[in-house]
Amino acid sequence: MLTDSYRHKGLRKKLVDELSKKGIFDKKVLDAINAVPRHFFMDFAIAPEIAYSDKAIPIDCKQTISQPFTVAFQTQLLELKNKDKILEIGTGSGYQTAVLCQLKSNVFTIERQHNLFIKAKTLLISMGYKPKCYFGDGYLGLQSCSPFDKILVTCGAPQIPDGLIKQLKVGGIMIIPIGEETQIMYKIVKISENELKKEALGDYKFVPMLEELEMKKS
Ligand code: SAH
C-alpha cells in the first residue's frame, strides 16, 4: 500500500518552498507539486529525503524521473488553462503526467518503453487520475488525437520534430529540450500555420528521445 505520511507531506512542502525560491512563481503549479506524492513514482525503498530532493532520480529501464525544478519550470511555461488538451512525450514514471492532470488538463501521454508505460498507467489510474496513456514513438506524436493546445517533451530531442509542430494548434505552445549531450529548453509558439516563435530558456540535461532505429537497437 502506498502511504503519504506527515513526513512525506512536510518534505514536499519544503521542496515547494525551495522551488518558489528558485523562481517558480505560478501558484497553481506549486499547488500541484504540493498535491502529488512524488515518492509514489519511485522505488519504495528510496528514502523520503531523497524522494523530495530537487534532483532527477533513476527509475526502471535506465530512465529518470525529471528533477522537480524541471517539471515545475516546464509546466509553468505551458501556461495551462483548465481543460487544455495536452500531449506529453515520455511518460516515464508518470510523475509529470500526474502534475498535468492535477492542473485539470486533458492529458495524452506517450511512452516508448512498454514496462514503463504499463507501470505508469496502472499507478496513475490507481491514484484517480485519468490521462490517456499510449505506448509508441512520441517522435511521431499522436496524429489521430491531434490537434493539441500544448505539447510537452520530457526527453532530449535532436531537433524540433515536424510531425509534432503539425499536431499543435495555431496559438499553441510546445516546450521541448533540444540537443544531443545536453539540451537547450525551447518555448515554441505556433503563430500561424507556417510561422513559429522560438525562445531559448537555458541549459538542461535530459535522457535522449530515441527514434525508431535506435529503439530497435535498445
Ligand atoms: N516525464 C517523465 C520523465 C521521464 S524521462 C517523468 O516525470 O518521470 C523521459 C522518458 O521519455 C523516458 O521514459 C523514455 O523512455 C521516454 N522516451 C524516449 N524517447 C521516446 C520516444 N521517442 N517516444 C516516447 N517516449 C520516449
Image (spheres, rainbow, N blue to C red):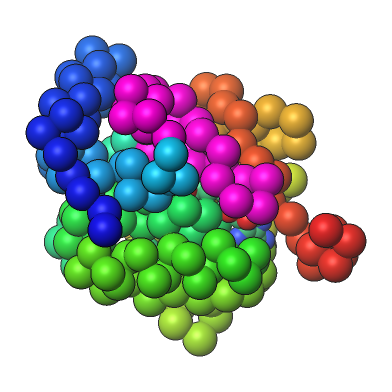
Quadrant showing the C terminus: bottom right
Q: Is residue 207 visible in this depiction of the protein?
A: yes
Asked if residue 155 lies in the magenta stretch, the reply is no
Nearer to us in this view, 162 or 170? 162
Q: Quadrant of residue 149?
A: bottom left
Q: Is residue 198 above or below residue 196?
A: above
Q: Is residue 200 visible in this depiction of the protein?
A: no
Asked if residue 68 lies in the magenta stretch, the reply is yes
**Residue pictured at 20% horizontal, 55% vertical:** 102
**Residue pictured at 51% horizontal, 34% vertical:** 57
Q: Where residue 42 sits: x, y (%)?
A: 43, 45
Nearer to us in this view, 191 or 125? 125
Q: Quadrant of ligand 1?
A: bottom right
In the rendered view, does 151 fall on the left or right side of 39?
right
Figure label count: 0
Q: Which residues are magenta?
A: 46-71
In the rendered view, does 153 fall on the left or right side of 140?
left
Q: Quadrant of residue 216?
A: bottom right
**Residue pictured at 52% horizontal, 55% vertical:** 92
In the rendered view, does 117 fall on the left or right side of 205?
left
Q: Residue furthest bottom?
A: 144
Q: Where residue 117 sits: x, y (%)?
A: 53, 68
Nearer to us in this view, 5 or 16? 5
Q: Quadrant of residue 137?
A: bottom right
Quadrant showing the N terminus: bottom left
Q: Where residue 209 sits: x, y (%)?
A: 68, 51
Q: Is residue 31 above or below residue 90?
A: above
In the rendered view, does 143 fall on the left or right side of 8?
right
**Residue pictured at 49% horizontal, 59% vertical:** 91
